[in-house]
Image (cartoon, rainbow, N blue to C red):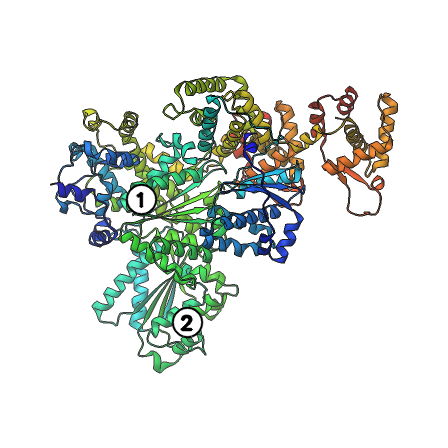
Amino acid sequence: MPTIALNDSLPLAAGDELKCGTAVKPGRSAETCFTGDATPRKRKMRSDSAAEDNQITTTTPPPKPCTPTKWKSPRRCVDDSPISPPFFELSEICIDTEQLRAVKEALHVSSVPSMVVCREDEQKRVLEFCKQCIEQEKAGSLYVCGCPGTGKSLSIERVKESLLDWAKEVGYQPPDVLDVNCTSLTNAPEIFSKILGKNLPQKKTKSATSPLQHLQSLYSQNQQSTSMKMTLIIADELDYLITKDQAVLHDLFMLTTFPFSRCILIGIANAIDLADRFLPRLLSLNCKPVVLTFRAYTKDQIMVILRQRLTALPYNVFQPQALELCARKVAAASGDMRKVLCICRSAIEMLEAELMPSKYNLDLLSTDNGYSDDWTTPAIDPIKQEIDVVRIDHMAVALSKTYRSPIVETIQSLPQHQQIVLCSAVKLFRRGKKDTTVGELSKSYLDICKLTVIPPVGIMDLSSMCRVLGDQGLFKVGQAREDKLRRVTLKVDESDIAFALQNSGLRELE
Amino acid sequence: MTTVEEIVTVQHQTDGLNNLWTQEQRKAWQISTCRVLSFGAEKIVVDLEKKSISVEQFIILCVFLKELKRHEDPQNNTKQDKTNGRISTLTVASELDAKLCLHLNSVGYLTLFCLMNMDMKWKENIPTLLRYFPPFRFFPITVSSPTAKKPQTMGRQTQAKEALILLRNRLCNPRFVFAPFSLSPDSNYSKLKFIVSSSVTEASNNSALLLGPRGCGKNAVLELVIEDMLKEYPDTISVIKLNGLLHSDDNCALKEIARQLCMEHQLLFSKMASFDDNTEFMISMLKECGLAHKTVIFVLDEFDLFAQGKQRLLYSLLDAMQSLTSQAVVIGVSCRLDADQLLEKRVRSRFSHRKLLFLPPSKEDLLRILKHILELPTDSSLPHDYVAEFNSSLLNILADERFKQVIDTLTNSDSTCNHLLKFLFSAVCHMNVETGFLSIDNFKAALPSIQRQPKLECLKDCSILELYILICMRRLEVKEQESYNFNSVMKEYKSIHDTFQTSDYYSRNVCLRAFEHLLACELISFMDHRGHNQSIEFRPVKLLISYHELYQGLKSYRSCPAILQKLIDREG
């Protein structure tokens, strides 16, 4: 028994963790199965007092023995401290928080859903395109565009997998796959050496010819290329390849037009008209890439995706209306799925925080008591609570947190004199000016000070206040030899300032 | 006063150190010769004899002092080399000075006392300096002639000194200052801790932005959280710190990440690795750390500066957050409120939109902080009755209307925590050691040293005749006389004398002496740099002091003649 207890309490060495971690890896996907041992939420909340906890280990009852196999993840061990109160293990509240955690994990951006819904058409089109290319052994280019967070990279990833499966099934030689994220390239032409490396892994590139020239010659000669496999090139964030003369992008797409070219190029980027804008020459040669647009998710699609992510879990944490609110809001603004997931997570956190106060008060209590005896008292009875769900108000708060700009709040909390400076700037710019200098601003500032009978600060303090405001992005303060001559421009909306200051007594704006 | 009394003046040998400087640097150095009065492990006292000193010169000075320090402890050699390498770039461009200062910060803590004559240009630069020198505190100190040390007879005095040390220690310890915030659940501390700890325990990725004006404790709270997390989960957290001022260049930032990762995991760092290699290394390290359930916390200070150019670094960092294998938190710290709007669309989409806003403390919070900092603890080594008496007198002060006024004037122009701490430090230093208690006068005395108006202080030292000259010049300007010189000022002076029949009239020579003094004080200056060969009387001059300042200065002048008051009132 004591050895097991010891085992639980010991922090794992790095090596052990590595082993455990690899063993546990599959469990971290969306369908994570949660084991029965519910780590009491309580432990986490008391975490800031871990140091003190350790001192009283001796006085606490030994932890309930648990079989080592129960610890599925080493993280649990980290989580748990040697003094986890045994009577907490199966209380309802723990299961609740545990469930919430599972939902949160399912909704995390990094957990890849088992299947990509709402993008079936697009996936089919890409797959058909690739199949066609492979069947006819001819090159082709495809440009995938769409706003961020609309599932482009994810869908293409799926297509890649199913294409390889299909090739194996049908008996075609599976193509080589080169997956490049163009942000990771030091300079744009490097992509050619990557392609070349994929095509001819065994050969060293000759120093005389550039990789591009090598590729071009490779694709224009018949005898060499017949023996070659097809290559699927997936270039994510294609717009990073844009150079001044657009040569790289152009050459890349031109590769697919060579008579014996063997590459299928799939470019992914945000701009809808990248091909039209940057590849006019391709257009004239009539070998423009096929363009596939990923539209921003609609409200219904967002709902479907969310439901699909949540169906893996046997319980429901969201009010349907809450989900709909989130879907509608985001669909109206950007249709960004990442944002949806993020907002949902933060709504859950809101709920978690709501469930927490009982524990928090307890924490305060125990800090006052110096952690002497609260573990033995029944004061910490788990409050049996109904399993709460994320309501519409949680979601509304989460949404406003994400979309709200901190500007109004900041202006309201600015010191009085800085508020006056903002007011005087607004006043100056009302007269139709675009910018002013610190010296002129100071005059306007002194006027307002006189009106409001507030003793003004000196010019130096004023200019340092301007700098503070400039640091925060409320002003733009230019460079000048003398402080008084610095140019000042307002960077926020007048109405924002007026709204923020409407109750502050600086009414002379009106 | 006390701080200066403790300083022992020691002439330091600077000759040998001059060899460290290249020719250019020495040139820059010679513009501002200064005398190192004393230096020890904690503080270096420098006498700036030259009146004005530019920011660059000041930084060179700091580096110089750093050099001095290096000769003291040779352990810091490796880090110092970097500073050395940067000196040469410093003199070329003044933008680089920020980088240099940051190096200084990371190398060591240096408290710098500058004893200098009153000088305006210098003071104008202080806000700039403060931005780059977070650990530096500038406390203008008035130097009194060293008094003979009184024999220490009373216990009260030693107690007071002990209390003083305690208070000063507290003021310099962000951990203590921000402790009261950490308890409440809505505080930024708890929110940030929740984000970080949920990432550690749930093996998820996260990102957050800490926004707020400078001096509101963004970094202090972050440090607190990280410290706590390191204590709580030792061996599972590694922290990578980047600063936008140093690493805004993607290449350099990734190199730095790779270097710090290597340091954390005892790997060999290769300086030759390319951008590509470093990106790959970072991503594979993140994967490796994710497998080992180690959380990597990236702290990006001055986040807005990373959002320039193509934002490759942010993209690759945040894109790594999208994968299941990594386990990391990206925390951006910025004072730009629109920092997340600066991000590119795709980078913004990958960012989690969590923003924590740090605001200056409200009035109630301010009082709470004041009480928290200034109240002496009952369980210290100090005698109980002294502590009780001290605290009760403090409570009286805090409740006093006059004290509230002082705090209001302080917070009306700048209400950030840092500003308050600076003020309190200066107030605590004014504490009378003999009585052993803080008094309201201490706070009042500290206020002008924080909100200084050097020109007004200059005016206080002027003679009546000099004031006359200033007013004459003001009158000339009101008359819209484009350019005037000493002779026209004398004419104006004469006319005032004639119209108002003033009792005192000084001769031209005396006036010229006063005029020269004004020039030296930089209350007035020549219009241009031409005509050096002309004598002072004929060169055109201008006022460097505004009407408002002149008015205020005259109002606060001890024994201002009524006629001057009348004249200045009329000009307005």
Residue A18 in percent (x, y) is at 24, 54
**Residue B370 point in image, percent of width and height:** 46, 26
Nearer to us: label 1 or label 2: 1
- Residue B471 appears in the rendering: yes
Residue B556 figure quarter: top right
The residue to which callout 2 is attached is A255
* Mark 1 crowd level (few <14, some 14–19, many ≥20, 10 Å Cα): many
Q: Residue at x 12, y 44 (%)?
A: A67
**Which quadrant of the view contains residue A349?**
top left
Residue behind mark 1: B199
Q: Quadrant of the C terminus of chain B?
A: top right
The residue drawn where x is 74% and y is 38% is B520
Question: What amino acid is labelled 1 in the image?
Answer: Ser
Write down the chain letter for disc 1. B
Give the structural element (helix, strand or loop) at label 1. Answer: helix
Depth order, front residue of A186/B394 = B394
Instruction: Give the CA separation, mark 1 to mark 2.
Output: 44 Å
Q: Is residue B8 above or below residue B61?
A: above
A294 sits left or right of A208 in the view = left
Specify whether residue A326 is in view.
no
